[in-house]
Amino acid sequence: MKFLRVLGVLCALLAQARAIDREAFTFTSYNLDVRIEPEQHRLAARGKITLRNDSASPQKNLSLQISSSLDWRSIRLDGKPVQFVSQPYTSDIDHTGALSEALVTLPREVAARGLVELEIGYEGVIPPEATRLTRIGVPAEVARHGDWDEIGKSYSAVRGVGYVAWYPVATESANLSEGNSVFETVARWKARELQAQLKIKLSQSGEGVPPTLLCNGEAGGLRSYQQIGQQIGQQTGAAYLSVNECAFQPLGETVPLFVIGPYDELDQPALKISYLPDHKPAAQTYALAAQLVAPLVTEWFGTSKGPTDVKAEVVELSDPAAAPYENGSMLLTPLNGDSKLAQLTAVHQLTHAVFSSPHPWIYEGLAHFAQAVYRERERGREAALDFMGLHRAAVAEAEKTSAERGQNAGAANALANTSVEEFYRSKAMYVWWMLRDLIGEVALKKALAAYRPDADTTPAYMQSLIAAESTRDLNWFFDDWVYRDHGLPDFHFASVHSRQMLENNYVVTVAVENRGDAGAEIPVVLKLEQGQITQRLLVQGRSTATIRLEAGSTPREVVLNDGSVPESDTGNNVYKIERPEKGS
């Protein structure tokens, strides 16, 4: 009988796990006290969370998820323990590839739009872990440099949801082997938590020199208290307690993270660099790089577009091969002393610091666009197009995946609301470059200067700013590239006719077919025996357009699209002119 009762309980729990709507509740408030214990690689958290039922029906069950390397210790409502069962839940939003999920049964239902406040406690270790990467075939050494999060004895760096669930979340399972599943799940989570208020008190105690505790929220200021060991029950040595209170009000697109280490600081007017011992020369190289690129960023984006001025922060990672990570105004990266790479990175970071937007295609797309502009300013247009070309294959592959998913994917992956990184980073970079080619640099700068993130409440807001600075009708462009995902264009030569009219006077007529659904204006380059000429041609999706080019030298070759417009196929973009016809 006892066995049957246990079996009955397990079956009931499994049924609850299958039936629960894990994304029914939105976390509206966190107030957590998080204690770090480096010697044991441990984290212990206590505090309160408030959740709102955003589903259409009353809910009595909810899910709370943390990293699988952490354990739930207590969950209370109104000072009384509530019933919960902890279970492993496979999901790649955490670097371990799994979550520790508490399935909570509330004593009463929470009505739609109703709130519930819970007192929670959890603790455990955060060791180096790259299981989610190695199980999909990533070599262990490469995986280690990608998932570098850990709490270590002398150094700790821990990112948030999408890397380590060190604060509670609630999402459906996501798998790196399933396309953009992880990115889409994290994006849904972030969209639900945009207005959440999050306060975290980070603390660490130990002996010796207090470390620096850093976070990417609004810091209350690092405070270190140092006492003689005997005063806190120790026989010898000096002990410290370091505390930093971080606030995210609201959370927005920021993913909370913390870093703890023996950092020194290099403070510049627009940039603060936290570097590890003996690495000051590399920090100075980055600071100089930021100074060199700052005028370009100011020229394009002015000063901060947020409610307050934000200073960009660079925090050095201890692993020199670690993959950089940027969130909010903070960049976590190795400092290797490479001046050119530092300048390119600094352009991206400073753009983020001065130009804020609630929309990733604007926020991330402009930062990548700024890098391309920097390359152009430094080495010319070809260098900028080469830089952008590094992103083209990823965009084309993402578009192919989107097309395979069917019609609904077209709306979901539109730049205005996409969660696909290849779109809101790389494709958006191309979109800003094309907009500059369409309306001119001066007009685009004026439109960006007029942008205010708090006023950006409708999808057409940015288009209205651009329309105010241009006489061109760009409805087709925003429809094809921003509001809907029409894929990529595919330009082909429909026909090319070259005729010699008089001596050293030629006319070349080019008909261009666009086999894709997205229209674009492309440069058509006529290469001559001496020099070349370029004109622009608008070719709408699934249509053909013709251009007539006059030349004063023998035409040799026609090139469609110089790389400034991403295409699904560039295999038919060059036409060799063998022998111009004789005209009359």
Image: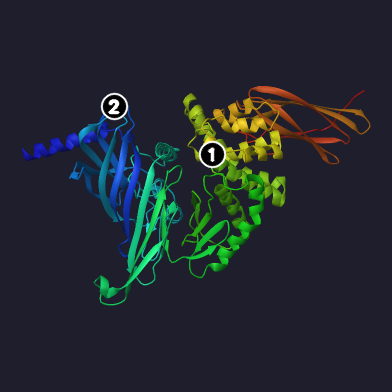
Do labels 2 and 1 touch, CB within 8 Å? no
Name above or below for residue 287 compared with residue 95.
below
At label 2, the amino acid type is Ser
Identify residue for label 2: 57
Q: How is the image coloured?
A: rainbow
Q: Residue furthest right?
A: 503
Alpha carbon distance from label 2 to label 1: 34 Å
At label 1, the amino acid type is Pro
Q: Position of residue 29 (x, y in %)?
A: 34, 43
* Residue 283 shown left or right of residue 74 in the figure: right
308 and 435: which is toward the camera: 308
Identify residue for label 1: 453
Name above or below for residue 363 compared with residue 487.
below
Quarter of the picture containing the C terminus is top right
**Which element is circle 2 on?**
loop
Give the residue displayed 49% in from the left and 48% down from the top. 328
Give the residue displayed 63% in from the left and 47% down from the top. 302
